[in-house]
Amino acid sequence: MRLLLVEDTPELARSVLRFLRAEGHAVDHAPDAATATEAMAVADYACVILDLGLPDGSGLEVLKARRRAGDRTPVLIATARDQISDRIAGLDAGADDYVVKPFDLRELSARIRAHARRAQGIPETRLQLAGLEVDRAAGRIWQQGQEIRLTAREWALFDTLLGARGRVLPKPALEDALYAFDTLVEGNAVEVYVSRLRQKLGPGVIETRRGLGYVVP
Ligand code: CA
């Protein structure tokens, strides 16, 4: 993965760079806010590790400017242990997560992988939503430890929505999921299956966006 480390403390930067490069990542290093802003504008990073206290400004301003420009790159802010206000400000400014200094490099690496995977649309296989526990790889769902059984078509529709979690999918995209079963899909099939899924999964799992489609928020 191509990563950007924004960090002005030379020893810390060196150890993080050494660790992440040894793991096979291509890591660029920006020691100040100006370099970071330019690098993020030019290159396409899988994840950015962003220190907040930089010699020429705040990492927070870098982040805000990139988010304003529509940049959705996953950003992990690195904050000091006692700076809870920094974490909140960072998350409010659009950071995806934070790590507390001094951080464990293996933990940093695991978080980078998780956020990069999410951003690439490769979701984690096990997830929780609206009181449900879902294992996408196994195609199984539980509610309070009780397994909920879905038909293959119900699962196909639900899994398609999960894969696009947070994005509204229009009806045709969902019809495609049902077409995979190689039978004729009737005009109201999506509505029918969504309604069955709601009966099984409960409210708040699949939302309707009138005129646009459906979304798992
Ligand atoms: Ca610093």
Image: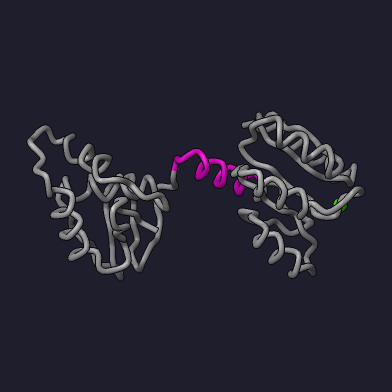
Magenta span main SS: helix
How many numbered marks does the figure carry? 0
Query: Viewer-proximal residue, 174 or 158?
Result: 174
Using the image, determine if residue 67 lies above or below residue 81.
above
| Left/right of residue 156 with respect to residue 15 in the rendered view | left
The correct choice, above or below, for 140 with respect to 119 in the image is: below
Q: Quadrant of residue 129?
A: bottom left
Magenta region: which residues? 109-122
Left or right of 216 in this view: 147: left
Task: Name the residue located 64 percent from the left edge and 41 percent from the top edge.
Answer: 47
Residue at left offset 34%, top offset 54%? 215
In reply to whether residue 60 is colored magenta, the answer given is no
Q: Nearer the viewer, residue 83 or 211?
A: 211
Q: Position of residue 105 (x, y in %)?
A: 71, 47
Residue 27, horizontal then vertical, whole percent: 73, 32
Q: Quadrant of the N terminus?
A: top right
Q: Residue at x 29, y 57 (%)?
A: 210
Position of residue 185 relative to residue 191, above or below, is above
Q: Residue 52 sits in which quadrant?
A: bottom right
Q: How is the image coloured?
A: one colour
The quarter in which the C terminus is drawn is bottom left
In the rendered structure, the answer to whether residue 81 lies left or right of residue 132 reads right
Residue 88: name its quadrant. bottom right
Residue at position x 32%, y 57% from top?
209
Question: In x, y percent, where is residue 169?
Answer: 33, 46
